[in-house]
Structure formats: structure tokens, C-alpha cells
């Protein structure tokens, strides 16, 4: 059965945070439901639909930014009470808007995630989880990394309510009371969790998770260990998942999976006969989807998928037909409801145009007076800077509550800008002098009208670190700009993993000295991405990393007065040695540095680089031949006389050119890595081989794996 849904925009509130929109339970079967949505202005709006128009039930006064909205109520009864988290406070409202609860959680930070079950309230700040029952302290847990979301499995065969925390370090933490039962490793940093209640009456011990890199998965939580059911990879390079819901939109008795992503994509998945998810419907909104719910809002008996977006639009994808088709000679009759709606919209539009003109004249007059004060318009920016494992690049996403005019990128380290298919902005580069000013990149993106979201991709070079700055100018008067800064770290292409492969030839760097656990942790945070800023609990810690470009590994084990770093790439060890020495010198700490270099690791790293280098060299040669072959094709007409290899190059010409264009400076980057590896190998032996680099480049120009290894051995 095909799913046909039509878009309907209901109303717009302020900028919304993740999971701040919920549908209240229906009063009867297939009756319309009320919608509760909260925004960053601190306003809770509850509305219902009457004659096709949104009618407010209640609207609260502005206040602190609301970070979460959940529904609750006594166990076994409909969840009709609205709970919101703002700062470190939780407030409760009835469905009519009467406030019945104000609870101060006494947290040092704002509440980031919340879950309500009967008299139990579960709240999470960045690292701290608290459980309250009837507003009294019950349980507490300090997480090893930032908490992104929380859900609680109900009292089932697990014996009691089981909280599960989604944490930034690619782990779901299953708790019992204040104790950690076990970790569930997932393939990306989880951003959202949802209980998988596919059918009514089923035991709810399965969790759906969505990650910031766009993966969707299902895992079963048992008493002792997790059972992984399935995972949907992000092959189409869609945005990260911000919200999930289960709802039976097809009416077959089995709930579909509704997914909202940060690039505006709404997806509906159903399960096939083998219980594997299959995509059934997708629709793209122009901004990130912060909340998603299935229900009946616009009209009785017509189900829909309701979404809330970052800029506050509450939009439905309804099964109600929005268009009527007239046959030949038939006259299309418009319903009185539709006619009234069009008249009301026209009147409202005229009133708004008059108001805009009045305000513009008023502003012009005040600007010309001697006591004129120009107020800077305030606008909200949602930005993300995330490492993409697939192509070892960073994705910079900028989302603004109003249309973007232009974005200026400035970097004090060398980086490459990569093409993004979804990006329609026009980019222009400015010349910059890197020597005195430290400017390596100045690029301006000019956006098309009504663009509120811009996605950029950059690739950095390990060992070169600094700051990437984005100056965002919206289409507002008077002109104003906000700056967002993102750190490019020395080992920027490394990603956290949970274990390392054994039997790899490892190089070891050992640091000892008079430094505290917190100091060496701050150095590791400075060097590597995805490390929690908060110093871990305990006396020591071990982190594992993988280089997303080369697949080399790094293991960091450190405690007070000692740090041990192991990697199968000698360049990684060299970068760590240089940066950690510099950071210790800044703090006037004397370090004792020792290292153990494994000669086999150099050949091992060259073998990891080999397939990438060989592929790029072949691609470059093919691209060089395309023009000559096309010219030959024009002159001869028939190219059957060419060898199969040349014919295939002609057939795949567009694909080859597109791939080559997507990988700017790829070959130079690989050459640079091999050169660094060559210099670092001999640097640890106390030999300077920079004079031999031209000979190395000659070997690379006539690349052969064996001759390159021989050059490394003989130099």
C-alpha cells in the first residue's frame, strides 16, 4: 500500500528545541487531538483545529528557554498533563493550561533531557542523571560523557523501571537505581531514543535510536546484555536524526517508524516480512525537524504525521486529500470553508503589508533624528560541526531562524572546502596573505532567497590546528552579524571507538612529570575530538581512536603524572609529542618524554595508504585522457577501434569528472602524509631527511608500492 500524504502548515511559534512538541490523547476514537508545543522564548502553546483553523486552548507567558516537553499522568491513565523543562526547573500544566507544579531540580546546569512516568521524574544535565519520585531524590548517576537523551523502559520482565541514557561517546547506558548495568555500543553518537511499541500490548523492552550521523537502529534491552536487531545506514548522506515516533499511519495494526532529520527530511519506515525496515515515504522540509508525532490533528478520521521545525513551524503531512480534480467540462466548486480561509488570508496579508509600511516609515523618521538609537536585532543560530567518517571531512551546518544573506568563512589553518550537493549558495574566494595575518581561507557564501539552512564541508590536515570562524549575516535591517567559532584540533580526523585491534605494530610515547590528572586530560581534549571536557571519574582513563582517513589507531591511557600513547602511525605519535610538549611548556611543567618506535609500523602505514594512493593515481590518469578521447570521438565518430579500457573511460567520463571534482587536492594530501611519515620516521632517529624529500616525490610520481618501501628502508 502506497502512502500518500499532503503538507499542511498550521502555525508558527518561536524557535524550538529538540523534542518540544507533543500530541495530547484524543477524547474519542479517531477524534482530533490537541497539540502542545514549547519554544525558546519560554512560551507553551496548546491549540486544536476548528473548521480548518488553529484555535488556541491556552498560551503561557514568556520565560526561560524551554529545552524539553513531555506528557505525563498517573500510571494506567491517559497522559494528559504537560511537563516542560526550562533551565534547572520543571513545570507542570493541565491540558487546560492551569499550572500545578513548579519543581526546582537544583542542578548546576540546565536540563538537557527529561522523561516522565507516573510519579517518577527523570532529568539529565550535560553529565548528571537524577531520578525523583514525588519530587524527592531517588537516584543519581554521573555519566562518562555528555547525555543527549533519556527514556525509561516500563516495569516489565526487567523487574523495575529501567532508565537508558544516550551518550555522546556512542554508548547507551542502561541503569538500575544509581548503578550502571551495562553499556550498549551503537555505530554513532546517539541523539534520540524512543521505545519501540510496534503493537499494543507487547512487552516494551526494545529501543529505537537515531544518531547524529544519520543512522537508525533497534536494540533489545535484556537483563544481562543487549540484542541488536537491525540498523539502517545513512547511504544517501542525509542529516542526523533528531526525533523518532511510532504510529500506525497505514491502519494495518502495526506501527510505522516516523523519523525527523536535521536536514529537514521526514521519513516513514515499515517492517517487511523479515522484520527489516523499508522506507515507504519521504518528504523534505526546508529546515531541521525538531519533533515528530503521529496522530489526528486537522480533521476527524484522517491520520497525519505532525512535525515541528527549528524556526517554529508546526506542519502536518496529512492523509486527507488536499486537491480535487475536475473532469472534462466539469466545474470545480470551492467549499465555503476554503473560500472563507482564502478571504481571511488575503485580509491578514493586507493588514501585515500596511503594518510593515508604517513601521518602516517610523524607523526611517527615528533614524534621521539627532537622538536616534539603532537597536541590533537578535536572532538565533543553530550550528553543528561534526566529523563524517565516510569521507573523513567535517560537516558545518548553520541554521538561522530568519533568511540568511551571506556567510563568511575564515580559517587560520589550511583546509579544503568540499562540494555539497544540497548547497545552492554561490561561493567566492578572497585572496589572503597567510604569513603576517595567519589567514589561510577567506570564502563568502551568498545564499538564495529564503535560505535558512546552509551545509558546508571542510577537510583539515592533521598536525595543523587552529580556529574556523563563520560570520553569519541574515537578511535583517539594520545589518547585523553573529560569529561562530569551531576548533580544528591537531588530530582532527580521529574518531572515538570502543576498542583497538591487537597484533598491530604499535609505536609508544610515554610522558611523565608533575602534572595532575585534570591537566593531562585538558591536553588530550585540546588534541583530539569527541573527548568529554569534564575530567573522567577515577584515577585513570583509556580512550581508543581511529583515523577516519587512514584507519590507523590510537590508544590513550593516562593518569596523574603519567600518559602512555600508542599508535600504529608514527606521524600521530610525532604530532602528539610536539603538541603535548608545547602545552606543558605553556604551563611551565617539566616533562620527561620517552618513545619506543616500531620499525614495522612504517611499512604497515604505507600498506594502508597504498589502495587510496593507487586509486587516486589511476583516477587522475583517466581524467587526463578524457579530453583527448572525446576529441578523437568527434573526429572519428566511431570509437569501436579503441581498446576496452579507453572505451570504458569515455562511457564513464561524467562520473569520473564528478568524482575527481569532489576530491580536491586528494593526491597532494596523500603525498603530504607519505612525506610526513618519511620525515617523522627519521626524526625519532635524530636524522633530518628534509633534503631527500625531492627524491621521495620523484618515487611517488612513478609510484610503485615496492619501490616506495625500498626507498623508506634505504634512505
Image (spheres, rainbow, N blue to C red):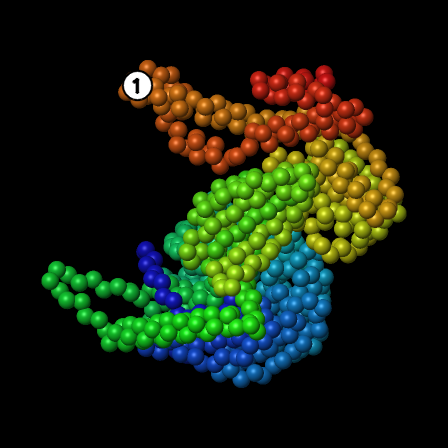
Q: Position of residue 216 (x, y in %)?
A: 51, 52
Q: Determine the image quadrant of residue 89.
A: bottom right
**Helix, strand or loop at mark 1:** helix
Q: Determine the image quadrant of residue 341.
A: bottom left
Please indicate, yes or no, whether residue 187 appears anywhere in the rendered image: no
Where 201 sits versus 407, above or below?
below
171 vs 348, nearest the viewer: 348
**Residue appearing at x 39%, y 29% in the figure:** 652
**Residue appearing at x 60%, y 63% in the figure:** 150
Q: Does residue 472 appear to the left or right of 108 in the view shown?
A: left
Q: Quadrant of the N terminus?
A: bottom left
Where 360 sits versus 263, above or below?
below
Where 443 sits versus 673, above or below?
below
Report the number of discs: 1
**Residue appearing at x 37%, y 74% in the figure:** 354
Q: Residues within 10 Å of mark 1 (few under 14, many from 20)?
A: few
Q: Position of residue 604 (x, y in %)?
A: 67, 27
Q: Does residue 655 appear to the left or right of 388 in the view shown?
A: left
- Badge 1 is on which residue? 635
Q: Quadrant of the C terminus?
A: top right
290 vs 341, nearest the viewer: 341
Q: Position of residue 639 (x, y in %)?
A: 32, 19
Q: Position of residue 382 (x, y in %)?
A: 55, 59
Q: Determine the image quadrant of residue 481.
A: bottom right
Where 121 sits versus 253, above or below?
below
**Residue appearing at x 63%, y 30% in the figure:** 672
Direction front: furthest residue:
370
Please indicate, yes or no, whether residue 704 appears anywhere in the rendered image: yes
Direction left: furthest residue:
329
Amino acid at each position: 500500500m502506497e502512502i500518500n500524504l499532503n503538507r499542511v502548515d498550521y502555525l508558527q511559534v518561536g524557535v524550538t528545541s529538540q523534542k518540544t512538541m507533543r500530541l495530547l490523547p484524543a477524547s474519542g476514537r479517531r477524534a482530533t487531538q490537541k497539540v502542545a508545543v514549547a519554544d525558546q522564548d519560554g512560551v507553551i502553546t496548546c491549540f486544536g483545529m476548528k473548521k480548518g483553523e488553529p484555535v488556541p486552548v491556552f498560551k503561557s507567558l514568556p520565560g526561560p528557554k524551554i529545552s524539553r516537553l513531555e506528557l505525563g499522568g498517573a500510571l494506567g491513565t491517559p497522559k494528559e498533563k504537560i511537563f516542560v523543562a526550562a533551565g534547572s526547573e520543571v513545570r507542570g500544566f493541565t491540558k487546560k493550561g492551569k499550572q500545578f507544579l513548579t519543581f526546582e531540580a537544583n542542578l548546576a546546569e540546565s536540563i538537557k533531557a527529561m522523561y516522565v512516568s507516573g510519579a517518577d521524574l527523570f532529568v539529565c544535565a550535560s553529565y548528571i542523571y537524577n531520578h525523583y519520585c514525588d519530587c524527592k531524590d531517588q537516584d543519581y548517576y554521573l555519566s562518562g560523557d555528555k547525555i543527549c537523551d533519556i527514556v525509561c523502559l516500563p516495569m516489565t520482565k526487567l523487574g523495575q523501571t529501567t532508565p537508558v541514557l544516550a551518550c555522546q561517546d556512542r554508548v547507551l547506558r542502561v541503569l538500575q537505581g544509581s548503578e550502571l548495568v551495562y553499556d550498549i555500543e551503537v555505530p554513532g553518537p546517539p541523539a534520540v531514543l524512543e521505545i519501540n511499541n510496534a503493537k499494543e500490548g507487547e512487552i516494551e523492552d526494545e529501543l529505537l535510536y537515531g544518531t547524529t550521523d544519520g543512522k537508525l537502529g533497534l536494540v533489545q534491552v535484556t537483563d544481562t546484555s543487549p540484542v541488536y536487531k537491525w540498523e539502517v545506514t545513512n547511504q544517501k548522506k542525509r542529516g542526523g536524526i533528531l526525533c523518532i515516533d511510532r504510529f500506525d499511519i497505514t491502519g494495518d495494526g502495526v506501527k510505522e517508524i516516523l523519523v525527523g532529520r536535521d536536514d529537514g527530511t521526514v521519513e516513514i519506515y515499515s517492517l517487511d516480512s523479515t522484520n527489516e525496515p523499508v522506507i515507504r515515504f519521504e518528504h523534505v522540509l526546508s529546515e531541521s525537524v525538531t519533533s515528530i508525532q503521529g496522530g489526528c490533528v486537522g480533521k476527524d478520521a484522517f491520520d497525519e504525521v505532525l512535525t515541528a521545525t527549528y524556526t517554529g513551524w508546526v506542519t502536518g503531512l496529512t492523509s486527507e486529500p488536499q486537491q480535487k480534480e475536475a473532469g472534462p467540462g466539469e466545474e470545480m466548486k470551492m467549499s465555503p470553508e476554503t473560500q472563507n480561509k482564502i478571504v481571511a488570508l488575503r485580509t491578514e496579508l493586507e493588514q501585515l503589508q500596511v503594518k510593515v509600511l508604517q513601521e518602516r516609515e517610523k524607523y526611517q523618521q527615528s533614524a534621521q533624528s539627532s537622538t536616534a538609537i539603532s537597536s541590533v536585532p537578535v536572532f538565533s543560530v543553530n550550528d553543528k560541526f561534526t566529523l563524517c567518517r565516510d569521507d573523513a571531512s567535517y560537516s558545518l551546518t548553520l541554521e538561522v531562524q530568519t533568511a540568511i544573506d551571506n556567510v563568511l568563512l575564515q580559517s587560520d589553518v589550511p583546509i579544503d572546502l568540499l562540494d555539497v550537493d544540497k548547497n545552492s549558495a554561490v561561493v567566492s574566494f578572497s585572496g589572503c596573505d597567510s604569513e603576517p595575518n595567519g589567514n589561510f581561507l577567506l570564502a563568502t557564501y551568498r545564499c538564495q532567497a529564503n535560505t535558512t539552512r546552509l551545509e558546508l564541508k571542510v577537510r583539515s590536515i592533521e598536525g595543523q590546528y587552529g580556529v574556523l570562524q563563520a560570520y553569519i549575516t541574515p537578511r535583517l535591517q539594520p545589518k547585523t552579524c553573529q560569529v561562530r567559532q569551531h576548533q580544528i584540533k591537531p588530530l582532527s580526523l580521529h574518531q572515538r571507538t570502543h576498542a583497538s585491534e591487537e597484533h598491530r605494530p604499535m609505536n609508544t610515547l610515554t610522558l611523565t612529570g608533575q602534572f595532575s590528572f585534570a591537566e593531562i586530560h585538558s591536553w588530550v581534549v585540546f588534541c583530539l575530538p569527541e573527548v568529554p571536557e569534564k575530567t573522567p571519574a577515577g584515577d585513570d582513563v583509556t580512550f581508543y581512536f581511529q583515523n577516519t582517513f587512514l584507519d590507523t589507531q590510537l590508544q590513550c591511557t593516562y593518569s596523574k603524572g603519567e600518559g602512555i600513547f600508542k599508535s600504529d602511525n608514527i606521524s600521530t605519535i610525532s604530532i602528539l609529542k610536539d603538541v603535548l610538549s608545547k602545552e606543558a611548556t605553556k604551563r611551565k611543567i617539566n616533562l620527561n618524554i620517552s618513545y619506543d618506535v616500531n620499525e614495522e609500523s612504517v611499512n604497515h602505514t604505507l600498506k594502508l595508504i597504498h589502495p587510496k594512493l593507487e586509486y587516486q593515481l589511476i583516477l587522475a590518469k583517466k581524467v587526463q585522457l578524457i579530453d583527448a578521447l572525446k576529441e578523437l570521438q568527434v573526429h572519428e565518430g566511431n570509437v569501436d577501434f579503441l581498446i576496452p579500457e579507453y572505451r570504458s573511460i569515455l562511457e564513464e567520463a561524467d562520473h569520473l569528472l564528478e568524482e575527481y571534482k569532489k576530491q580536491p587536492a586528494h593526491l597532494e594530501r596523500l603525498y603530504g602524509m607519505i612525506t610526513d611519515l618519511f620525515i617523522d620516521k627519521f626524526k625519532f632517529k635524530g636524522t633530518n631527511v628534509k633534503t631527500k624529500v625531492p627524491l621521495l616525490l620523484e618515487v611517488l610520481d612513478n609510484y610503485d608500492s615496492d619501490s616506495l618501501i625500498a626507498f623508506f628502508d634505504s634512505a
